[in-house]
Amino acid sequence: MATIEAVTPRVYAGTPRRGPITRLLEDERWLASFLLMPTIVLLGLFIAYPFVKGVLLAVTDTRVGIPGSFVGLANFEKLWHDDIFRVAVYNTFLYTFVTTVFKLVLGLWLALLLNRHFRGKAFVRAFILLPFIIPTVLSTFAWKWMFDPTFSVINWMLFHLGMITGRINWLGDPDLAIISVMVVNVWRGVPFYAISLLAGLQTISPELHEAAAIDGARAWNRFRYVTWPLLLPVTMVVVLFSVIQTFADFQLVYVLTGGGPANHTHLFATYAYQIGVGTGLLSEGAAVSLAIFPVLLLVVIIQLVYIRRVETV
Amino acid sequence: MAQVTMRSLNKMYDEVHAVKDVNLDIRDKEFVVLVGPSGCGKTTTLRMVAGLESITSGRVLINDKVVNELAPMDRDIAMVFQNYALYPHMSVYDNMAFGLKMRKFDKPEIQKRVREAADVLGIGEYLKRKPRQLSGGQRQRVALGRAIVRHPQVFLFDEPLSNLDAKLRVQMRVELKKLHQRLGTTAIYVTHDQVEAMTLGDRVVVMRDGWVQQVGDPMTLYNEPANRFVAGFIGSPAMNFADVRIAGENGGLWAEGEGIRLKVPAHLDNRVGAYAGKPVTIGIRPEDMRVARDSDPPELNIPAVVEVVERLGSEILLDVAVGSVTMVASVEPISRAKVHEQLQLAINPERLHFFDAETEAAI
């Protein structure tokens, strides 16, 4: 006769020293909440609370020192008729679109160059990152000097090359000012594109290029049919980050032009700052900031959906 | 029709001389295998033929035409890579059609050729799938398909089976052989696996440190290795070696070493005689040794102590100690040899190999 005695489950006895907290934490549901706590607190404190506060502020007529009362969508209606706000909206889209195109093209070009083998590759790669790692405000101040009508090194160079006779007021002319701001943004943003895309390129096996070369694809076709499609997911993520950052850009414009001349170079963020903090109309400033939100939400949704599609194909 | 010729082919990297003076004449429809340990220059040689690696000096000719400066696509070759190198974002069909599209074939012709190749390789039902949805063996077939749809002059294979599991590798090996018999396209095949080399190659090129060691058909390499390296590389389990000295005695030659005293067979007297009094290396294949019977002449036996017994079913491998060296003997499966047992192993005198101890060349 076989006995079943041996398989009787053993009772875990002799753990009277465990306290109630220990026992609670051994329950995965409680442990999970416990571990999530720091993240939830941080996100709540620094993301959710300011966001909700901003929304609440935008539907009141609060000013500095005056609590204000509920006014519905009056702030947004006022913005709708605000010419400077319309300029800021136009500028922000133009600024984001133009700089993103240039950053992508130049960044990709640099990445393709850096992906080749040459002497001093590591050095050049580190060098390329410089515009990205210098604090933006500092590098922008340097650019401000280069654009200064009197001290501009660019003017000096053009003058000595015989290309101009008078001074160019880079930041004083409305059209030149927005172009100048874009140039600085591209200068600052290209390294991020170049390094990220380079990282993407390095994940593509060189064997694929060799196979394509044997298959009869010349350089352009190898790029078009092999490199580009394989790099696309990385490109989309890089563009997503960059668009969000560029759309909400503040430092460059604030330091270079402060939104001038005559409010011609304002972006969402600088205009929101000027109204909310500069003028003290907190509620209207909040309304300007909130106006970015739907646009960014749309960008994020479109790109995330696209990335998911590319990745699951 | 495609012959591939290599003349004094050399490849220098900054410090490394990877391929040294390789001369090969590969005939039309021939299946030639380059084999050797890793770093022997076999893959570099193949890549120079493909045009993926620049040629430091020497010439590569395809059909008597120097192709040194031709781009890979203009050499009319197809290559199968170790990691398949399938385009991950393209379907199986597009992977196979890519080379034809790049060469501007019209659509019906592309479809016809891809269909044909897919049928030959048995991957017709996977044409719409992406490479990642395929198993290793299926991916390998797609890579083969991509090569054969182009009807190239030469196939180049760079260790195409090494990523497959052992069973599949044997199966694909047979299929490759059949495919070659059917298509008859000249093929150069690189592998580090001597079994693959022996089974696939019409001729096998053994390489080491950038030098060609020997070129020959599989049985020639096995029976008449040109040097100690080839002798040790070809054959599994590997040939046994022992250092001995040649001594002349009683009108015959004897190979004497630690724990070994063998009579040199008379037919080798002429060649080995020149080494009388000098050190040489003898080579004995495991399959040329067996447990001695009483009738075996004692001057062709070596005493051994069994260390490990490996029963493989069709044969038994005895790892034995002979003096201070370890040898492997492949004996009949009925052998009752036990660990620690002392026994005499009889050598087949017809198949004894001698190598110069210094140059390692066969004597």
Image (tube, rainbow, N blue to C red):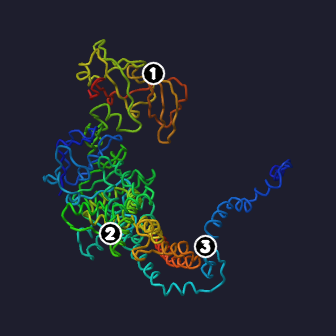
- Chain to which mark 1 belongs: B
Q: Residue at x 40, y 58 (%)?
A: A139
Rendering coords of residue B202 (x, y %): 27, 48
Check disc 2 and report the residue beneath it. Answer: A170
Q: Nearer the viewer, residue A186 or A284?
A: A284
Q: Residue at x 31, y 12 (%)?
A: B249
Residue A108 disc label: none
Rendering coords of residue A97 (x, y %): 39, 74
Rendering coords of residue B321 (x, y %): 47, 25
**Contact? badges 2 and 1 (CB < 8 Å):** no
- Quadrant placement of the C terminus of chain A: bottom left
Rendering coords of residue B45 (x, y %): 26, 46
Please, which residue is most extreme toward the left here?
Answer: B64
Please, which residue is most extreme toward the front here?
Answer: A150
The residues tagged by marks 3 and 1 sit, at their Cα atoms, a distance apart of: 82 Å
Image height check: is B25 above or below A295? above
Mark 2 residue type? Trp
Q: Between tags 3 and 2, which lies in front? A: 2
- Chain to which mark 3 belongs: A
**Contact? badges 3 and 2 (CB < 8 Å):** no
The answer to which quarter of the image holds residue A95 is bottom left
Mark 3 residue type? Phe
Q: Residue at x 55, y 29 (%)?
A: B338
The residues tagged by marks 3 and 2 sit, at their Cα atoms, a distance apart of: 37 Å
Q: Indicate the secondary structure of the residue bearing disc 1.
A: loop
Check disc 3 and report the residue beneath it. Answer: A51
Same subunit, tags 3 and 1: no
Q: Residue at x 31, y 61 (%)?
A: A151
Mark 1 residue type? Ser
- Chain to which mark 2 belongs: A
Residue B324 disc label: 1
